[in-house]
Structures are given as C-alpha cells and as structure tokens.
Amino acid sequence: MMRPLDTCDTAPPAAAGPARAAGGVGTPAQHESAHLHVTGRAVYTDDIAEVRGTLYGAFGLSQHAHARIEGMRLDAVRAAPGVRKVLTAADIPGINNYGVSATDDPILADGLVEYVGQPLFLVVADSVEHARAACRRAEIDYEALSPILDIDQALAAGAFLMPSVTLERGDAAKALAQSPHRLRGQLRIGGQEHFYLEGQVAYAVPREDGIVQIYSSTQHPGDVQFRAARALRLAAKDVQVVCRRMGGAFGGKESQAALIGCAAALAAAATGQAVKIRLDRDDDFMITGKRHDFTAQYEVGFDGDGCILAAALQLASRCGYSSDLSRSVNDRAVLHADNCYAIDNFRIVSHRLKTHTQSATAFRGFGVPQGMLAAEQMVDDVARHLGLDPLEVRRRNLYGPSRHYVTPYGQTIEDFIVPELLAELMDSSGYAQRRQEIAQWNRASPVIKRGIAMLPIKFGIAYTGVFLNQGGALVSIFEDDGSVLVNHGGTEMGQGLHTKVAQVVAEEFSIDLARVRVNASDTSRVPNASATSASSGSDINGKAAQAAARKIKERLVAFAAAHFGVPADAVRLCANRVQAGGHDIDFPALVRLAYMGRVQLWDSGFYSTPKVGYDRAALKGRPYLYFAYGAAVSEMAIDTLTGESRLLRVDLLHDAGRSLNPAIDLGQVEGGYVQGLGWLTSEELVWDDSGRLRTHAPSTYKIPVASDIPADWHVALYRRGANVEDSIHRSKGIGEPPLTLALSAFFAIKDAVAAVTAHRVVPRLNAPATPQEILRSVQDVRRRAGDAGPC
C-alpha cells in the first residue's frame, strides 16, 4: 500500500524576485529519470544498442584462497563452441593492475591467487552462455598455500596489509586508571554485500585510429579510463569512458568497476570487436569486494553519572587480499569513533589486516558506520552498567559548552545542532512515554520482548584525500531555443545528482527545470573528475556547474545592459524572462540576441573545496568541510525462543541543511536507513574454512524487503537546517549519513535482549543481529543471570 510522501519545510529559495521558474533549488522536483525508470525505458549499460559483431566475456575463477598457479591447461577452453579468444596475464600489453592505491590488484592473476573467485583468465565468445560454459573446461594446477581468512587469524599471524595507526588525545591510560568505574568489551561488526540491482558491467567498443570507448557502470569513469589506458599501453586521450546511469552502486563501483572495464577493453583490443562483460550475481558476489568487517575491543572509564572520562579503543578490519581503498576506509572509521561525544582522554588504534578473501572496498559510509557503532557500543554499555537510560548517558556526553567542541583529530565543530535535533525528535516520537509502555509490555510478556533506542549521528563531509575535493562542469546554452545542456564530472546511480545539478543551473538562469538537461558522464567532456562518493557529489559538481552558469549569466547580463542601454544592475532574470529597464523579453529571445551579438554561450566551471587540510600520517587537521547530523528512534521486538526480530516503528530526523530537493533527500534518508538495517540485522557474509564465500546469492544472503519496513514510519528533514559553510545553496551531503541512523535498530534489539533479564545483565550482541545471533545473546544473558528462561 502506498503512503503519502514524507514532508518537510524547506528554506526560502536562493534566488529572490517577484516570481520563480518551475523546479528550481529547494523544490521537490521529481528525479530527472523517474519517468524512464517506472516505464522501463531507462537505458543502462547492458541496454545500449550493440554494434554488429559484439562478443561477450566471462572470467575463469580461482578455486583456492591462497595458492601458486603451477599450470593452466586451457586448450579445451579455446576449443569450446563459440570461443574467439582466451586471455591470460601474459596477453596484457601494459600494466596488469586495476588497483586504485597500489599495484596489488591484478586484472588477471599472474602466478599467485589470493582468494576464491579471483579472475585467472578471460574467455571471449559469441554468446554469454558459450563464454561461461567454456570457463568450466579449464584445468588448473595449484600448489596450495595456507590461507588467512579472518581477523583473529590475521592478528595472530601479524598479517598487516598496511601499517597500523594510533590517534590519541590526552592520557587515556592514566585517566582510565583513575576512573571510578571501568568496563571492558568487544564487538564483532560484519561486512556487507552491495547488492546493487544492476551488476558490474562494461561494454568496450574499438573506434577508429586505435581509440577504445568504454561504456561502464562506474562511479569513477576517470579511474576506469586511466587503468584501462595503462593496461592497453595507450595514452589516456585514446580511452573514453561513458556512464549515463547506474542501477545502484553504494561504493561497489568506485574502484572495482575498473576490473570489468579493463577486461572488456583488453578483449576488444585483442579481438578488434566490441566486447561486453556482464557478471551474473554469483560471480559478482565471488569476485568483487564488500564492506569491511571489523572487530572492536574497548575499555572505558566513567563516573557515577555516566560521564565518560577515558576510553581506549582497538579497531581491526579485514581488508582482504589487496589495498584497494582500505587505508581511507579505516582512517574514516578512526575519525568517527567519537560520533557525537566529547572524550578528553581517548586512544584509538587501527589495524588494517590482510586476509585471503575478496578485497574489501568502499561501501556507503566508508568506515564511518563501523567506527560509530563501536562508539555507541561503549556509551550503551556504560548506561546499562549504571542502570541508566542510554539516551540520557548519550546526552550527558555530547559535545557542548560544558565539555568542548574539538574532535580527537583537532577539528573544531562549528554548528553542533545535535541537542536541538534530539529534543525535537524526543518530542515528536513520544520517546519517554513509549519507553515506559515498553517496560510494561516486557514485564507481562515472557517470550516476546521489545526494545527502543534513540541516538544521534555526526558525519563528516569531504574527502580525507584533500586532492580529491575538486570538480568540473561544462554548461552550454543553445541559441535556437535557449535550452541548456550540462556536463559535469559526477555520476548518476539513482541518488538524484543529475536532478540536483540541473536544478542549480536552472536556478542560476531563473528558467524552468524542464529547459535543462544533464548529459551522460563522459571523460572526454569533463576530465580528471573524482569519484562520485563521500557524499560530496552535489557539493562539488553543483558548485562547478554553478560557477560555469554564472560566467555565462554575467555575459548575458552585460550584453542585455549594453543592448537596451541600461545599467547592469537594472537587468534581472526571473521566471523565464529578462527585464532590462522598461524592456521585457523571454529568456530564449535574449539568448538569440546574444548569439547574434557574438556572445559566448558556453563555459566551464571548476570548484575545489575550501578550508580542508589534513595530515594523514598524524591523523590531525581539518579533513571535513562540515558535518551532517541526524537522530533516530527505532523500536524492535524479538522472539526469545527463535531469535527472530521485527522492526515496529521508526522515527528519523535528519539535517540536510537547506535541501536542494526535499523529495530526493527524504528518499535518501529512507533508503540509507533501510540499507543500514540490512547490514545490522540480516545481511551476513559467511566464508567456509577453505575461504569460499557461501552466501553468494539471494537464496543465502538476505537483503531487506518491503515487508521488513513497518507501517509506523516517520521521516522528516530538520526544518531549521542550514549549512554554516558556503556549500551549494547551504545544503548538506545526504548520500551516506542516513545509513548510520540504523544503528538505533541494533541498539533497540540489544535493549530487547536486556529485557530478558529485566536489564540486570549487559547483553553481548554482535552485528549483524541475525536470529542466530539474537538467540545466542539471549541464551548468554540468561546464563550469566542464572535464569532458566520461559517454560
């Protein structure tokens, strides 16, 4: 059953005037491709009309987690029906690497395999079915080596993929020793499969003079371009990468899409024909990386009121076999291990571990959810140890005048609105009354227990790699009708970036949104673009497009002033018209006049994020331009006999600043929460003792579905939100932060488990809180409390 769209108040429009054009900044304009999505006419990479003679590729995969390749007998593969070419590492003319941060990600394994599912060779055939069938004919000789498969094994073996880092403020050891109360704890935090609806796919087409055009489902066309050029031993100018849209990505197509793009390009160059590679769901699971799973071990010191005096936290992550983006992911986990809490004496150690599993990669949140979950676990345990409401302990430890506004890495928080968010959500959600009602329910219910949790989030927005905080755009106005075409460096994966950028440009020219179109992302039009990630897409690309539009607008205003003989400040663009003194014409008419006057009607724009500066070695500085905030209340029920859980009610309040598009932003809040809910409750990755991923299909890996979402669902944007920084129209990044609101669901489950022993025992609950994990935790609290449980 459909429900009404969630509503929110938005800030006044950025452009003042007697009238506004339709669909500008701040309006809930529909997604620019919504009509194509719902009618099935949206063209994704696999839908592009294929050129004559297109071939299809499939990978032959390793069946060992760690082994030397002693020989590959591929004659039967080459002789299989429909096979045109078989490529191995020896057939790569350039660099056999698609890794973004190191040369440890071979396109095709060369002598050594380091996870089950690693590509060994590539078959190119006249059909997808022939290519995949031929792969199964390979005979591979291995010398098996001992694999390291999980965090505990890696720690014991000292298998560090990169050096560990330590961030420390104050003297945690001394403050812990002097604390009136101390607790130790640990937590396992699972990984997550991206499960984008559109899998990894690339289509490479040879063009004239050795040029290769790659249609890629990627968040980072420039990365695919550069890796493919190096693999082919071509100049970057000879490789063009295009992406109109993706059917989801969530970080999984930031670095890992380069593998598919490089392989397709190599096959196209080797055969002289267009080649498409589309991974099926099982191969996508087996080949590509996941969210990093973590372990957290902590010791926390506090007083009788629950005020945290000191904390020591060790984070260890399974990075997989290669570097990928693990350094940055783990850095961001460290930088968010404070969440919203001022801890004067804080020591955080981060271990980045090598395992013989898929290389963990970017995933929505990029390490932040894991660091934040560890912080919330510490605070929650303190509250339960003292018999206090966890929300009250959270509020007592917030950044604020009585403590300070400086993070452990030295950044001053300039707009900490969390107390206001919490107060508003407490009131709108009826948190206090519901907590009492849940306590009454639990006293009367021996089997079904309920829990509730409320918590805030603080999420830094910008790349910690400072050089990535840049973007470009090209804006063109056509003289025939005054319509506008925009090219920018960001990519569209369903999140509405193209819509927001179009709104920004429409706002600058004061024209209807329908007059503006955003083109496909294309490395030949906007080069050297950063990935669309880190919740910075609208900030960076919106600002770049705005800069380009303003250059054109300034020329149009100057021309109109000269043409009509009025001062420049007497020229106004509003609601598709141009007013200059007593003259009033429509926008297309001005454009035609300007064209006849030889005025440049196109321009480029560039934006680099100001103020950011960060010493990665010291983990100090200002890595973020600003912070996005939110607050969440989740209510859960668990069955103590089976471990099953159900989400009963959700209340979310999120700070999007002055929203560019409240309809899209509300969708991001809702979708982020649901994806976080899956990570924390049902999505479990399981590897067996040989290193084979056993949860590699929808039959064994459970993402949330519509029936997991309660009817009692309340989502709003913070009405008084506004960015203190000069972001695009004072908005805030929205892609990743809302996922962390789902932490409230995990702690609501923990609250329900605690109710099993009337909150006498602090539960030990790991993520994801699957039925098996909940049942284990229920049995554990009963055992420690000496309870037999219900009859």
Image: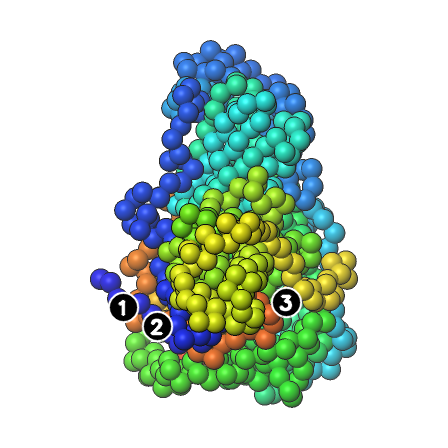
**Residue 397: x, y in percent?**
60, 81
- Label 2 Cα neighbours within 10 Å, binned few <14 / some 14-19 / many ≥20: some
**Residue 508: x, y in percent?**
50, 63
Q: Spatial distance from mark 1 to mark 3, Cα to Cα? A: 35 Å
**Residue 547: x, y in percent?**
58, 59
* Amino acid type, mark 1: Pro
Q: Tell me the number on the disc at residue 625.
A: 3
Determine the secondary structure under disc 3.
loop
* Amino acid type, mark 3: Leu
Q: Which residue is mark 2?
A: 7
Query: Is 268 on the left or on the right of 326, as rendered?
Result: left
Q: Choose between 443 and 700: the one closer to the eye.
A: 700
Give the position of the C terminus as an image quadrant.
bottom left
Picture residue at 38% right of the left edge, 31% below the top = 49
Query: Is 247 on the left or on the right of 564, as rendered?
Result: left
Q: Tell me the number on the disc at residue 4.
A: 1
Q: Is residue 700 above or below residue 179?
A: above
Determine contact: label 2, label 1, CB under 8 Å: yes
